[in-house]
Amino acid sequence: MRQRFRLYRRKKGGRYYIHDGATGKQDSVGTTDRAKALRLLHARNEAQEMPAINLQIAKAYLAAADESFVNRTWREVMDEFVKLKTGSNRTRSERAVMDKAFDSIRDLQLLETRSEHFLRVLGFGKVSTNNYLRRFHNFAADMGWLPWPVLPKRQWPAIHYKEKRAVTREEHELILSREHIRICGTERASRLNYRAIATSESNPSLYRCRLRRRYLPPAGTASSPNPDNPS
């Protein structure tokens, strides 16, 4: 594993400095003694490597019990969550999974998920994002896919729904007026279509169609008169 920190010595003053390869920051160790400087360097590298080593050790033990446990992502959690739903619940869940706020964790492994990942999703999301992220998290925990909670129960932001109210009288009258206009327009279009067919004797195909409807046989008869020869 590549070490993050390295040691170097400046010619002016002879002091040793530690260079951070991740941030580019350089800090003085406050000594010209190489032995002391090396001890400080090793301490920093070990402090940086221990969390990563511990995670790798945990993955090795967990992979022995379940190979998919280590590589499982939140995308798989969402897919399995949706599969267990039916009817309108499944439709709502499929719509919720498509929320763009989940894109930042969709391909993130469960074992590598930290609380700041969830907080970033909640910051960009809406009320439904908060609701479904809780459900995905609880589903993964219940299935035994999470070795520890990503966010403690008390640290989840409260869900605040928008205020619900009834429609006002003006809004109700506006809805009725629009519905009346739609119904009147439909009835007028129906009358126009009937007149077009009724006055279409100049069009042979429409005229024959009108005659067939006029001379349809009564129910239960085996034959019908020729529409081109009504007599």
Image (spheres, rainbow, N blue to C red):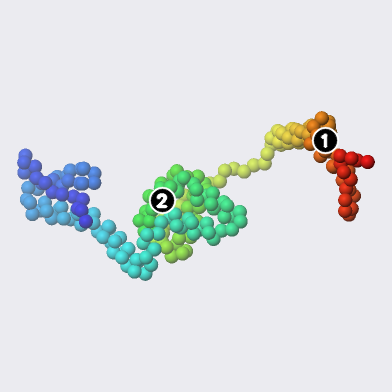
Q: Earlier in the sequence, mark 1 or mark 2?
A: 2
Q: Is residue 32 left or right of residue 26?
A: left
Query: The residue under label 1 is which amino acid type?
Result: Tyr
* Residue 41, placed above or below residue 196: below
The quadrant of the picture occupied by the N terminus is bottom left
Question: Is residue 191 shown to the viewer in this render?
Answer: no
Q: Where is residue 116 in the image (x, y as percent from the top left)?
A: 38, 50
> In terms of depth relative to the viewer, which is nearer, 208 or 229?
229
Near-viewer residue (94 or 213): 213
Q: Quadrant of residue 48?
A: bottom left
- Residue found 46% across the figure and 64% down from its top: 143
Secondary element type, mark 2: loop
Left/right placement of residue 227 relative to residue 12 reads: right
Q: Which of 206 and 31 is in front in this view?
A: 206
Which residue is drawn at the image coordinates 89% and 45% (left, top)? Answer: 225
**Residue in view at x 76 percent, y 35 percent:** 186
- Please tell me how crowded label 2 is: few (under 14), some (14-19), or many (20+) other residues with Cα within 10 Å: some
Q: Which residue is drawn at 80% across and 32% down?
A: 203
Dividing the picture into quadrants, the one containing residue 177 is: top right
Q: In which quarter of the image is the C terminus?
A: top right
Q: Nearer the viewer, mark 1 or mark 2?
A: 1
Q: Name the residue under label 1.
A: 207
Could you tell me residue 35's position as x and y percent?
8, 54
The residue sitting at the bottom extreme is: 65
Give me the C-alpha separation between circle 1 and circle 2: 66 Å
Give the amino acid type for the residue marked by disc 2 in the picture.
Ile
Label ID, residue 105:
2
Is residue 17 shown left or right of residue 62?
left
x, y percentage for residue 221? 89, 53
Few, some or many residues within 10 Å of mark 1 (<14, 14–19, 20+): some
